[in-house]
Amino acid sequence: MPTDESMAVVRRDIETVWNEADLEAIADLVTEDFVYYNPMVTEDVEGPEGYRWLVENFRGAMSDFEMETESMVADDTTVATRFRTTGTHDGELLGVEPTGAEISVTGMMFDRIEDGRLSERYVNDDALGFMRQLGLVDQGSF
């Protein structure tokens, strides 16, 4: 698949699923054996239903959630995206009660594209910064 088409799949996921909350689009965007990896998420996230659960939980905890693509590069099979997510934490998220904190977190994700759909996603975002913004970790000196 050409790199432009692969990047378009990831952009569509970000805009349609994450920013517009169109969860019905997930069926067209991820493979049945899709797997999502993120050290902050302890639940298994597999397939369209697992991905839907993940999006519902994150979007449900941030009423004004938005994901912005800062840069994107691709090769034959993988799309790398640097992103920023913003929102207000006004719902429970991964066991954390609402804090009302405004968050802005950067991260990287690497997507493997298979037949025009997401088949695997690895996410590494600024978990420490996220926890600091929620007031879960002391600002400290490091």
Image (cartoon, rainbow, N blue to C red):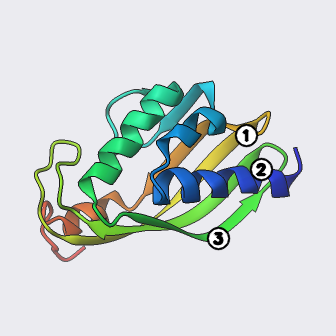
Of the numbered discs 1 and 3, the one sitting upstream in the chain is 3
Q: Secondary structure at mark 3?
A: strand
Q: Which numbered marker is on residue 10?
A: none
Q: Is residue 128 above or below residue 78?
A: below
Q: Quadrant of residue 14?
A: bottom right
Image coordinates of residue 26 in percent, x first then y, are 56, 38
Q: Is residue 42 above or below residue 88?
A: above
Q: Earlier in the sequence, mark 1 or mark 2?
A: 2
Instruction: Evaluate if marks 1 and 2 touch, with contact meaning CB atoms under 8 Å apart.
Output: yes
Image mark for residue 6: 2
Whether residue 1 can be seen here: yes
Specify few, some or many for label 2: CA neighbours under 10 Å numbering under 14, 14-19, or 20 or more. many
**What percent of the width, then of the height, locates residue 76?**
85, 46
At x 89%, y 50%, the residue is: 2
Q: Most extreme residue toward the bottom, as rendered?
A: 141
Q: Secondary structure at mark 1?
A: strand
Q: Are marks 2 and 3 in contact (CB under 8 Å)?
A: no
Residue 68 at x, y = what percent? 52, 69
58 with respect to 36 (left or right): left
Q: Residues within 10 Å of mark 3 (few under 14, many from 20)?
A: few
- Residue to which mark 3 is pinned: 71
Q: Residue furthest right?
A: 2
Residue where numbered disc 1 is placed = 113
Position of residue 129 measured from the top left corner of the image (x, y, whole percent): 30, 67
* Placement of the C terminus among the 4 image quadrants: bottom left
User: How many angstroms separate mark 2 from mark 3 (CA)?
Assistant: 14 Å
